[in-house]
Image: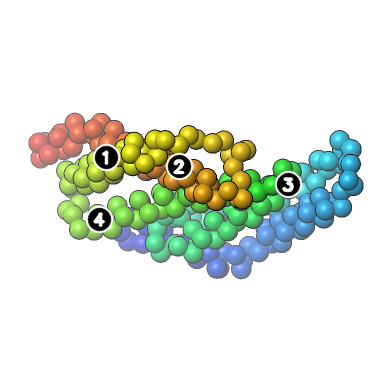
Amino acid sequence: MPDKSDDGPQLSVDIANQISTNSGYFVVSGVFAAFAVYIYRTLPANPGPFERFMYIPFIALSIFSAAMFYAHLASEVGSWGSLWEAHFQFKNVDLFFFTTLILTAVSGISSLPTGDGRGVILFLIILMVFASIFLVNAGLRFLLQWIPETAKWRLMLVFSVSIPLLIVCRIVWTSVLNDYSIIPIQQLSLTRPVELGIQFSILLVAILQSMAAMAIIAGLLSIPLVLWDEYSR
């Protein structure tokens, strides 16, 4: 059972216990995935319209079964929002990697209809997004331990982290990545790792820049509330 700590919204999820007690979801998911792969591998050289897509329902059922596990886990934690937050806490790093591996499997089986490596590329993109949020969230939580628990200091922390991050992202974007164009995922390939690395760099900078900009906007909007809190005491 997940248990809340005494310092607020911190959540501890025992993923090993959850897998042990709810392994049926993954058994069913694995069976459907095996059916999908088997049907895909046994397709004739020139399959008909029905044969071409008959394994897709099994892919959907496999993903749905795995999603049911997370629905159960969300109900145990309290809500989907709490489960999402739990992924980005250091004490739940095993949950983070477990979900990442689940996304790997989902990406792999989802790439069967295309027959290429787009599923793996999609997984890497999802992993980068998750990892960026995880690291930023973990960094902020670490810094919050060293400042007073007041709205004024928290607002100062937001600006002191977000503004330099936004400046660095803009410098990298304009001086390093400005000469490269964004390539659609359909045109990316694992056989061109340099091109793939450049696109991931563009994505990473865009993610960090967006997070910094959103934090600055949220901080600016909260200034009146912080001032009211300070001068109404």
State how far apart marks 3 and 4 are (Cα).
45 Å
Distance from the alpha carbon under mark 3 to that under mark 1: 41 Å
Q: How is the image coloured?
A: rainbow
Q: Are marks 3 and 4 in contact (CB under 8 Å)?
A: no
The image position of residue 137, as x and y in percent, is: 35, 51
**Dot 1 surroundings within 10 Å: few (below 14), some, or many (20 or more)?**
few
Residue 141 as seen in the image, left or right of residue 51: left
The amino acid beneath tag 3 is: Gly
Say which residue appears at 40% left-offset and 39% top-offset: 177
How many discs mark residues in the rendered view?
A: 4
Residue 149 percent location from the top left of the image: 20, 52
Residue denoted by label 1:
167
Circles 4, 2 touching at the beta carbon (< 8 Å)? no
Q: Which residue is mark 4?
A: 143
Q: Mark 3 or mark 1, which has the lower sequence index?
A: 3
Residue to which mark 3 is pinned: 115
Instruction: Please tell me whether mark 1 sits on a helix, a strand or a loop.
Output: helix
Quarter occupied by residue 219: top left
The residue labelled by disc 2 is 203
Mark 2 and mark 3 lie on one chain; the one further toward the N terminus is: 3
Q: Earlier in the sequence, mark 4 or mark 1?
A: 4
The answer, for residue 50, to whether it is visible in the render is: yes
Instruction: Tell me the kind of residue under disc 2.
Output: Leu
Position of the C terminus, as image quadrant, is: top left
Say whether residue 216 is left or right of residue 103: left
Residue 80 in the figure: left or right of residue 60:
left
**What amino acid is labelled 1 in the image?**
Ile
Residue 231: percent from left, percent from top = 9, 36
Q: Residue at x 36, y 41 (%)?
A: 176
Judge the density around disc 3: few (<14), some (14-19), many (≥20) Cα neighbours within 10 Å: few
Q: Is residue 215 something one can see in this rendering? A: no
